[in-house]
Image: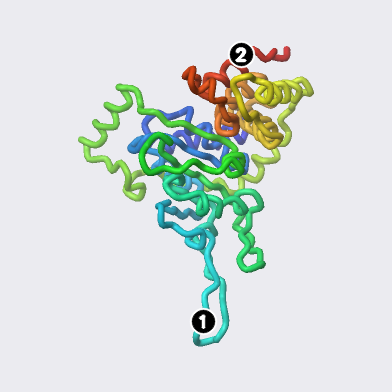
Amino acid sequence: MSLASEIYEKINSELGKVIIGQEEIITQMMVGMFGGGHVLVEGVPGTGKTLLVRGLARLLGYSFKRIQFTPDLMPSDITGTNVFDQKGSNFYFKKGPVFTNILLADEINRTPPKTQSALIESMEEKQVTIDGVGYRLPDPFVVFATQNPLEQQGTYPLPEAQLDRFMLKVIINHPPREQEREILERYVEGQPLHDLEETDMEVLDIKEPLGRMWDEVKGITVEWSIIDYVMDLIRETRQDKDLYLGASSRAAIHLLTAARILAALRGSDFVTPDEVKEMGGPVLRHRVITTPEAEVEGLTTDQILEGILTRVKVPR
């Protein structure tokens, strides 16, 4: 078993003590985490979005902060601000909650675009600039942002520039009947469902192995045919008649990175088209915009992307 797949199995095992099912979602979130990217998690209330992020942060032992996004939230509530010290008669910088390893931006689409955009510099450059002075964020710095579907009342669409900075968009649906019954059984048996401190989930000492895992990921073989396949998919999104906006070059980099990490987590030493196709939806669904005609026909972004993934020729 490779180091990456061993870490993957440990995290899956420990999260399974709190989270029922959602194996595919957990895998996608780990791909984003280990890829140094940011993850947008969408789902209706009560599907465990916040619990997933809290559990992952606790397992890895990284510093963790949570911001509840509301309509009256200000940019300085995220980044911090200069405060006047009356005793010293000078200003000092009071850091905001963005200065952490894992930031949970809870219900990010509940706040107006002005405040949402306060995260753009942090997500791209891993720093914040206040009054012309730049402040570096801790390493690693990963944003997990949760949001409710846009058709719900009181939400705001995220700016396209910010959406493109998320490596993945993960969609959480209601669990199957069997898994939902197991959740209720655990509740009846008195198991704490949201208090992670009361569970037997243990913190994993894997910070040092994570560094060695990166060396392992860099050694994953990527054939030229895989690079051409990624480019064919990206360029097809720009030519599809049902898409008004196609994927960016950043999307191509993220798709290749995600496929590489997924291969490593599964113990493979090379990337196949299967990893690329599996990551295609999560990496691209939030970066493309459907045409008005496609919306009238009832086509969703995922349906259009599925068609692209089906018709683009797979390398042998």
Side (left or right) of 110 relative to 213: left
- The residue wearing badge 1 is 85
Q: Going 74% across and 27% down the picture, which residue do you hit?
A: 221
**Residue extending furthest toward the left:** 188
Q: Quadrant of the N terminus?
A: top right
Is disc 2 placed on a helix, strand or loop? helix
Side (left or right) of 267 relative to 71: right
Residue 40: give x, y in percent of width and height.
Answer: 51, 39
Classify mark 2: residues with Cα within 10 Å, few (<14), some (14-19) or many (20+).
Answer: few
The one nearer the camera, 119 or 204, is: 119
Give the total number of marks visible in the rendering.
2
Q: Going 62% across and 68% down the picture, which residue do you hit?
A: 131
The one nearer the camera, 59 or 226, is: 226
Task: Confirm whether residue 6 shows in the render.
Answer: no
- The residue wearing badge 2 is 310
Residue 127: give x, y in percent of width and height.
Answer: 63, 57
- Amino acid beneath label 1: Asp
Figure quadrant of residue 38? top right
Above or below, 215 against 222 in this view is below
- Amino acid beneath label 2: Thr
Residue 217: give x, y in percent of width and height.
Answer: 68, 35
Q: Earlier in the sequence, mark 1 or mark 2?
A: 1
Figure quadrant of residue 275? top right
Figure quadrant of residue 238? top right
Residue 123: give x, y in percent of width and height.
Answer: 60, 49
Q: Going 60% across and 58% down the picture, which residue do you hit?
A: 137
Query: Disc number at residue 278?
Result: none
Is disc 1 placed on a helix, strand or loop? strand
Side (left or right) of 256 relative to 49: right
The one nearer the camera, 20 or 78, is: 78
Q: How is the image coloured?
A: rainbow
Task: Confirm whether residue 308 shows in the render.
Answer: yes
